[in-house]
Amino acid sequence: MIDKLTIIGERINPGFASSKALLENQDIKGIQALAVSQAQKGAAYLTINVGESAMENLDFIQEVVQAIQAVVDVPLAFDYPHISVQEACLKVYDPAKARGRKPIINSVTELRWNMLDVLKIQPAKVVLMASERLESGEEISNQYATQIADTARRMALRVVNEDYNLTMDDLIVDVSLCPIATDTEAQTRRAIESIRLINNDPDLRGIHTLVGLSNLAVMLPKDALDGQRLGVRIESAFLTMAMPYGLDVILGTPGRDYRILPDNDFVMQGVKQAIDLEGFETLERVQQLYRRD
């Protein structure tokens, strides 16, 4: 494990085939075992996402929250853009079973500001999605690091200055991360620069920054040219570059071999060079890390 890196365990999520089967079968014991495994491997929080079925069956997601809290004492993160689901989760979440720690609401955007109304149920930490901004009544995708940082600043200051009883320490800014295998628009570089700008803002002192790290290495083969695992080293390369700028939270897999890489690591060198390039040159540099059939 990397010091000062908070891992939100991502596995209770239908995006993983084995987890999807557990959730579709409403296998509570299997879900509990998955929660215990992640907690034992160092997860500081556990994401709860049972899929779109939560909209039709709030009782099930409440049952999942209570069942998980019966077997682990780590706080939970509720990964839904729907107020009704967040409300259902917060109504049954018991802070006493998480050693008094708050859950996480994931996520709030400028267009989805009324999500913060759920804090009337109980206190929670909040993920602010800064990849989009509200402009002339519409949600617009941010294309530049400065736009992401400006959106994060605007949202964070609004939250702490309004009557939500939240501090910067309660806020986690998601700067978004795309697969590096398709990154023709320098989004990986933009994420790192966004993290730097946010954490250099003196008015945001104490705020946290987040990426969904598993997004980075999807669509890549298993092994690098040197025969070692490729995906986790690409993820580790990102951590090596982003953590010095303030990245401190990831949505990731507990127990995965995340580590800080030396400058001379084969994959580290390739990722550094790739994100300094533009367009298809980025993809070509990433492809040089593995054997193309």
Image (cartoon, rainbow, N blue to C red):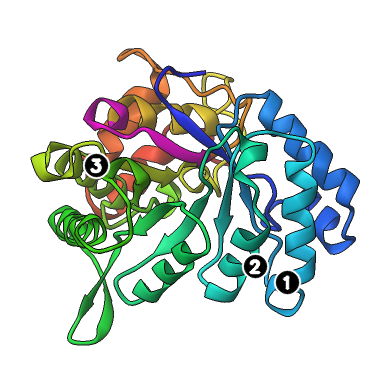
- Residue at the location (39% across, 75% down)? 114
How far is the residue under mark 2 from the one under mark 3?
A: 32 Å
Indicate whether residue 142 is drawn in magenta: no
Q: What kind of residue is marked 2?
A: Ala
Of the pair 267 and 173, the residue shown nearer to us? 173
Q: Which residues are magenta?
A: 242-251
- Please give the residue where the numbered disc 2 appears in the rendered image: 88
Specify few, some or many for label 1: CA neighbours under 10 Å numbering under 14, 14-19, or 20 or more. some
Sequence order check, earlier mark of 2 and 1: 1
Comparing labels 2 and 3, the label whose residue is closer to the camera: 2
How far is the residue under mark 3 from the one under mark 1?
A: 35 Å
Rendering coords of residue 19 (x, y %): 77, 50
Of the pair 221 and 27, the residue shown nearer to us? 27
* Residue 178 in view, yes or no: no
* Residue 98 in view, yes or no: yes
- Residue 73, image quadrant: top right
Residue at disc 2, secondary structure: helix
Rendering coords of residue 25 (x, y %): 90, 61
Indicate whether residue 249 is drawn in magenta: yes
- Residue at the location (29% across, 52% down)? 187
- Residue at the location (17% across, 44% down)? 204
- Please give the residue where the numbered disc 3 appears in the rendered image: 195
Sequence order check, earlier mark of 3 and 1: 1
Specify few, some or many for label 2: CA neighbours under 10 Å numbering under 14, 14-19, or 20 or more. some
How far is the residue under mark 2 from the one under mark 1?
A: 7 Å
Are discs 2 and 3 less than 8 Å apart at CB?
no
Sequence order check, earlier mark of 2 and 3: 2
- Residue 144, image quadrant: bottom left
Are discs 2 and 1 less than 8 Å apart at CB?
yes
Q: Is residue 118 above or below residue 14?
A: below
